[in-house]
Image (tube, grey):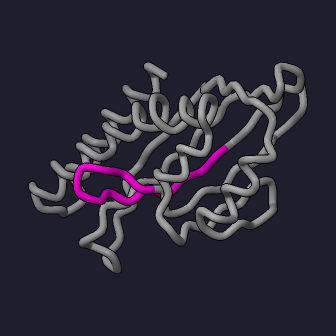
Amino acid sequence: LQDTRATLHKLNEMAQNTGMTEEQKVVLSAYCEKTVPWLEDLYYKKFDSNRLDVLNLYDAATPIIWNGYRMQGKDGMASALQQLPTTAHKLETIDCQPIISENTPAQHLILATVNGQVTYADEITNTFNQVFILKAEGKDLKIVYDCYRWLSTL
């Protein structure tokens, strides 16, 4: 993930040339830099140890797509999470980039793509890809979109 942090730094440098105000650049840069450790240390560690705690990281109406199956919001996800066996995620890459839009200039949105391997019940390992859209709310991040997909069985 060190390479991802270097890429994130380059991305933040590129954001300097977008026509954003200095304040917007500083805020967006801070949120992008916060995203990688937030996903590593908060989301995936909680998911693997006490997964119902991840529900607090989601916005109430977040659409969640799990291997093509759509769940709506925290209630839909809570039911699915309770049915999963134990998990252990091994993250290989995290790529974060700002979503810069004239339609939502007041919102600070970040697109995060995560790739890695997940092992279920210490038996079955799958490669996965997960895409998040995160929204900055004060000092916190909230997940406003989540699409999780298994890529293969090893």
Q: Residue at x 60, y 51 (%)?
A: 131
Q: Quadrant of the C terminus?
A: top right
Q: Position of residue 2 (x, y in %)?
A: 43, 19
Q: Position of residue 130 (x, y in %)?
A: 64, 46
Q: Which range of residues does the magenta coloring cover?
A: 130-142
Q: Position of residue 147 (x, y in %)?
A: 66, 56
Assess whether residue 131 is covered by the magenta stretch.
Answer: yes
Q: Residue at x 53, y 72 (%)?
A: 61
Q: Look at the picture and state if 13 lies above or below 77.
A: above
Q: Is residue 14 left or right of residue 117?
A: left
- Which quadrant would residue 98 be assigned to in this image? bottom left
Q: Residue at x 60, y 26 (%)?
A: 91
Assess whether residue 48 is covered by the magenta stretch.
Answer: no
Q: Position of residue 39 (x, y in %)?
A: 48, 37
- Which quadrant would residue 41 be assigned to in this image? top left
Q: Is residue 18 left or right of residue 80?
A: left
- Which quadrant would residue 96 be assigned to in this image? top left
